[in-house]
């Protein structure tokens, strides 16, 4: 039996309820965040909580609990469920708006599920991706609006790819659920600086990479992607995952590159210090 938390009480999964009048259902208006646990301990929790509350504020959504109260509830949920390696989702909705359009006090939800991370073989071979011209609305906000990403899944599968990378005006931005980095032929690490969600794993990788090579947060142009020495994505559920093919063009030697490997090792070491 798994537990969830809705507003003010814990409930068995499947018995938790939110009424259909919520703006999340009526208009797709809500924010969320998602973090991992390792050995029943949340990873980089303060970073995720800060982004969650920033997203809610940006969409004028009132979370019915303050950050410290949410943190306490998270630890209670972890204790009740005891899923050592998991993903926990925090959701704040637009609430039961009388006019079905204006945000009011939101509903708050915590969910926890087991999480399987990419295996060693996936890291070694990397993934194939395609690109798509698109820009998310309010990209700095982690909203529940994944319409384009989900709609593009058919195209992604037809191309036998694993994911899709957005770009606009020849400038790349992000994946639907991950950030992107390139290692330039000159040995610099570059990552897009605008029109994207500031990923927590992205933030940690930038901190780690500064000890290895020059780091640039800037506009990264589409042609740089296929001419890069290495490309990789970062996310909560992927950690660091090499990209070895873009739109049918092989990147580097088609396997995880040396910089990606070093950063992955250092990221695992950073994780270990958290738990």
Image: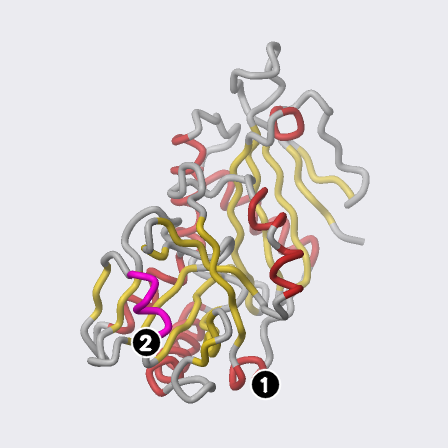
Query: Magenta part of the protein: which range?
Result: 221-227
Image quarter in which the N terminus is found: bottom right
Give the SS element for disc 1: helix
Estimate the x, y position of residue 103 in percent, counting from the top left. 52, 20
225 falls in the magenta region? yes
Prevailing secondary structure of the magenta residues: helix
Task: Place residue 52 in its image quadrant.
Answer: top left
Judging by the rendered image, the residue that carries numbered circle 1 is 121
35 falls in the magenta region? no
Tag 2–tag 1 contact (CB < 8 Å): no
Task: Please report the residue visible at 56 percent of the width from the left and 51 percent of the height from the top.
Answer: 75
Q: How many marks?
A: 2
Estimate the x, y position of residue 57 in percent, counting from the top left. 40, 30
Q: Residues within 10 Å of mark 1 (few under 14, many from 20)?
A: few
Question: Which label number is shown at residue 227?
Answer: 2
Q: Image height check: is 4 above or below 265? A: above
Question: Which label number is shown at residue 9?
Answer: none
Return the residue found at the far top.
99
Give the SS element for disc 2: helix
Q: Is residue 9 left or right of residue 224?
A: right
Q: Is residue 199 left or right of residue 65?
A: left
Task: Place residue 259 in its image quadrant.
Answer: bottom left
Q: Image height check: is 32 above or below 186? A: above
The span from disc 2 to disc 1 (Cα, nearest Å) is 25 Å
User: Closer to the camera, 232 or 166?
Assistant: 166
The answer to which of marks 2 and 1 sits earlier in the sequence is 1
User: Closer to the camera, 260 or 154?
Assistant: 154
């Amino acid at each position: 039996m798994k537990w969830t938390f809705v507003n003010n009480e814990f409930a068995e999964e499947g018995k938790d309820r939110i009424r259909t009048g919520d703006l999340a259902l009526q208009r797709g208006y809500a924010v969320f965040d998602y973090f991992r646990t390792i050995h029943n301990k949340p990873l980089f929790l303060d970073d995720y909580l800060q982004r969650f509350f920033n997203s809610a504020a940006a969409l004028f959504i009132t979370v019915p609990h303050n950050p410290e109260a949410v943190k306490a509830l998270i630890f209670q949920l972890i204790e009740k469920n005891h899923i050592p390696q998991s993903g926990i989702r925090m959701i704040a909705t637009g609430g039961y708006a009388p006019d079905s359009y204006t945000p009011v006090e939101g509903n708050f939800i915590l969910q926890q599920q087991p999480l399987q991370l990419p295996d060693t073989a996936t890291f070694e071979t990397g993934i194939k991706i395609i690109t798509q011209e698109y820009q998310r609305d309010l990209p700095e906000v982690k909203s529940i609006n994944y319409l384009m990403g989900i709609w593009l899944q058919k195209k992604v599968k037809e191309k036998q790819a694993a994911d899709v990378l957005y770009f606009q005006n020849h400038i790349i931005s992000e994946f639907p659920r991950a950030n992107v980095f390139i290692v330039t032929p000159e040995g610099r690490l570059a990552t897009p600086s605008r029109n994207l969600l500031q990923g927590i794993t992205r933030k940690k990788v930038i901190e780690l990479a500064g000890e290895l090579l020059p780091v640039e947060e800037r506009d990264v142009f589409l042609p740089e992607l296929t001419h890069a020495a290495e490309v990789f994505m970062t996310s909560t559920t992927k950690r660091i995952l090499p990209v070895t093919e873009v739109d049918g063009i092989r990147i580097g030697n088609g396997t995880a590159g040396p910089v990606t490997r070093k950063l992955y090792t250092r990221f695992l070491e950073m994780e270990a210090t958290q738990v």
